[in-house]
Image (spheres, rainbow, N blue to C red):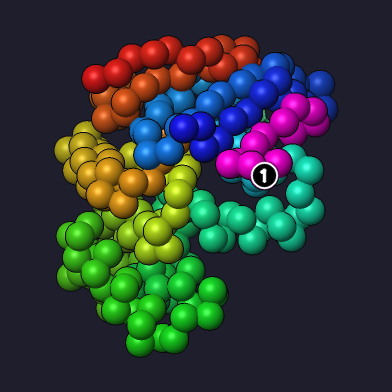
């Protein structure tokens, strides 16, 4: 079943045509790697399909709803309820402890502190970072920080996790560990993962690869 469908996306930044007719289909629960050379438009595509960046033209559908015709407010609400995000540098709130960071999305949706922190602790244990619960992000290693960020992305049980170079700042051993934990957690919850990477080693964790060249995405059916 198609969960997220993007058709004929165009996006320019001044004279730079980042996307020129890109399309993509993500099915429920699948892990898709978006690959391609630097500057080909991978991040722009991810931001457009995740409702972070409005395309200049083209359509993005999520289930039976059209992201591209929603108001900013509806799109933010959808991102909060249905999507999770992991970026290259975790993007945790530095003033909060790791536990508070993971609990934050639940607190923002109105959950009581105690319940939110209990759920956050469970996810931190699954990602093997419960040991840094009381530390601030600046006091953890890069790999721990990324695993905390993944716990935060998963805590709301999103339908889709968008990950942009989640292992980009890690050494290969930590990168493998993060990918293993991210993909097994996603498989456990049934979340789809859209993973931007330029590393074949990272893409090897996906079910399927999509290659972006010159702002156009081409599906490569490659089921492992
Ligand atoms: N906010 C922006 N302002 C101006 N130009 C941008 C912006 N974001 C992206 N671009 C340009 O759009 C093109 C596509 O960028 P994008 O970041 O999507 O590529 P990418 O494939 O993710 O690259 P990389 O692998 O290097 O991260 C590039 O030429 C980039 O310079």
Residue in the picture at 23% in, 44% down:
184
Residue in the picture at 76% in, 55% down:
72
Query: Residue 62 placed where, x, y %?
Result: 60, 41
**Quadrant of residue 99 in the image?**
bottom left
Q: Mark 1 points at which residue?
A: 65
Q: How crowded is mark 1: few (under 14 residues within 10 Å), some or many (20 or more)?
A: few
Please tell me which residue lies in front, 94 or 59. 59
Evaluate whether residue 142 shows in this view.
no
Query: Residue 195 placed where, x, y %?
Result: 42, 34
Left or right relative to 21: residue 103: left
* Vertical arrangement, residue 96 with respect to residue 128, above or below: below
* Vertical arrangement, residue 62 with respect to residue 208, above or below: below
Q: Please provide the residue range marked out in magenta.
A: 53-66
Residue in the picture at 52% in, 54% down:
82
Please tell me which residue lies in front, 156 or 100. 156
Evaluate whether residue 122 shows in this view.
yes
Instruction: State which quarter of the image contains the C terminus.
Output: top left
**Quadrant of residue 81 in the image?**
bottom right
**Quadrant of residue 114 in the image?**
bottom left
Answer yes or no: disc 1 within 8 Å of ligand 1. no
Residue 32 covered by magenta stretch: no
């Amino acid at each position: 079943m198609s969960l997220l469908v993007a058709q004929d996306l165009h996006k320019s930044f001044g004279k730079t045509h980042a996307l020129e007719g890109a399309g993509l289909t993500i099915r429920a629960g699948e892990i898709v790697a978006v690959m391609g050379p630097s500057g080909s438009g991978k991040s722009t595509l991810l931001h457009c399909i995740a409702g972070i960046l409005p395309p200049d033209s083209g359509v993005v559908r999520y289930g039976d709803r059209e992201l591209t015709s929603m108001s900013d407010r509806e799109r933010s609400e959808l991102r909060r309820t249905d999507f999770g995000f992991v970026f290259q540098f975790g993007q945790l709130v530095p003033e909060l402890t790791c536990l508070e960071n993971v609990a934050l999305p639940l607190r923002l949706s109105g959950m009581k502190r105690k319940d939110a922190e209990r759920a956050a602790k469970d996810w931190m244990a699954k990602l093997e970072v419960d040991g840094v619960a009381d530390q601030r992000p600046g006091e953890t290693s890069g790999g721990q920080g990324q695993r905390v960020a993944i716990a935060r992305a998963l805590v709301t049980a999103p339908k889709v996790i968008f990950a942009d170079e989640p292992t980009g700042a890690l050494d290969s051993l930590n990168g493998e560990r993060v990918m293993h934990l991210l993909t097994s957690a996603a498989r456990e919850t049934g979340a789809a993962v859209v993973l931007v990477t330029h590393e074949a080693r990272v893409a090897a964790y996906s079910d399927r690869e999509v290659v972006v060249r010159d702002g156009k995405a081409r599906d490569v059916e490659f089921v492992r």
